[in-house]
Image: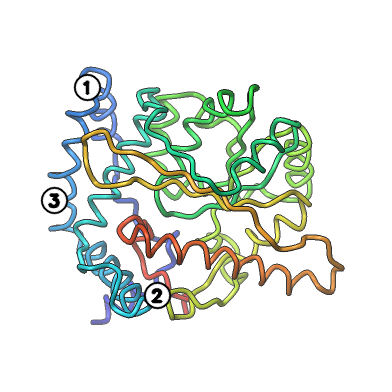
Amino acid sequence: MKNKKKEDKLHWADEKEVIHTNIPLKLLVFLFKMLPSFFVLCLAYPVSFFYYLFSKRAREESRTYQKNLKYFTGGKVPQKISPYRQILSFSFCVLEKMQGWLGKFNFNRIEYQQDDIDILLNQLKENKGALLISSHQGNMELMRSLSENNKQLVGHDVPVVAIMEINATKQFNQTLSQINSNFDLNLIDPAQIGPDTICTLMDFIERGALVIISGDRTSARSRDKFLSKNFLGKVAPFPYGTFLIPFLLKAPVYYMFGFRNKNSIFNPKYKIYIEKSQIDLECSRNERDARISEICSEFIEKIEKFCKIYPYQWYNFYNFWNFGE
C-alpha cells in the first residue's frame, strides 16, 4: 500500500522510461525498412498484451482515467473499461511515429475537418505564424514528422518548432533522431526557455513558422507553477508556463489534435482537428493571470471533448490528478 501511495505522488517526469535500451527500437526500424508497414504494425497486438500483463502501473492508471471519464459522461463513455485498448492504441501511436519519420506514412490517410483549418492556412499563406497547443492525446508527433505536408497545403515550406521535454523519452527520441536528422531540427527543451528563447520564437512566428507545445503536463523543472483546474470532474494540475507563452509571443493560438479513427492495421485514417482560441491576448499585466486561466480552461474543454470522442487515445499513463503533495 505504501508503494502504491508513493507511485500516486510521483511526478510524471520522474517515471522511469519503459524502454531502457534502444535495441528493440532499432529492430523495429530495421523491420520497417525491410517489410511492408502492415506486417510491422501487427506487432502492436502482442507487444501491447505483454505490456498489459507486466505493467501494473499502466493498467491501473488507464483504468483510473477511464473510470473518471465514465463518471464525467454519466456512464456513456467509454462503453467498456478496457486498459488493454488504451495500451494497444498507444502502441499504434509509437509505431506510426516511427513510420512518419521514416517517410513511410501515406498523406492520403489524413482527413482534415471543417473547422478552423482554412483560417490557419490563409494565415500561413501570408507568412504569418501561429502557436499550436496540443496534448498527449492521439498522435501529434506524427503530425510534426509530416510537416512537409504543409507545403502541399500552403504552397511553400512552413518551419515547425516544437517545445518538448527531450529527456522524458530519451531512448525513443534518440532513435527518432537517428532515423531522421530533421527530428532534432527546431526542437526546444522547456528548460532552455528564457528571454532570448522567447525572442527567437517570436522571430520564427514573424517569419511564418508554427510553434507547437503541449498543454497537459506540468513542467519537469517548475513543478510548483501550475494551474488547478477541473478535468473530467476532478481537480488536476496544468502547466502555467504553457499558457503564459501565448501572451509573451502575442501570436494567434490554435488547438490542434490528430486522432486515429480506429485500432486497425487495415488502412486506418487520421482525423486532424484545428480550432482557434477565442481568448483575447491583448490585456494589461494586471489582467494577464485571469486570461491565462481562461485560455487554460478553454484548452481543457477541448481535451475533454476529444476524450469523449476518442476515449482510448489518452496517453498520460500516470496519476494525472496528482499534485505531488
Which of the pair 286/295 is nearer the observer? 295
Residue at mark 2 to residue at mark 3: CA–CA distance: 26 Å
Q: Position of residue 78 (x, y in %)?
A: 27, 67
Residue for point 62% across, 38% down: 161
Task: Give the residue type at disc 2.
Answer: Lys
Say which amino acid is labelled 3: Phe
Of badges 3 and 1, the one in the foreground is 1
Q: Residue at x 34, y 76 (%)?
A: 68
In the rendered structure, the answer to whether residue 24 lies left or right of residue 248 reads: left
Q: Name the residue under label 2.
A: 9
Q: Mark on residue 50?
A: 3
Task: Quote the CA–CA distance across marks 2 and 1.
Answer: 43 Å
Pick the quarter of the image with the N terminus: bottom left
- Report how far apart the C-alphas of labels 3 and 1 lie in the structure: 23 Å
**Residue 74 located left or right of residue 298:** left
Q: In this view, does 18 lie to the left or right of 324?
A: left
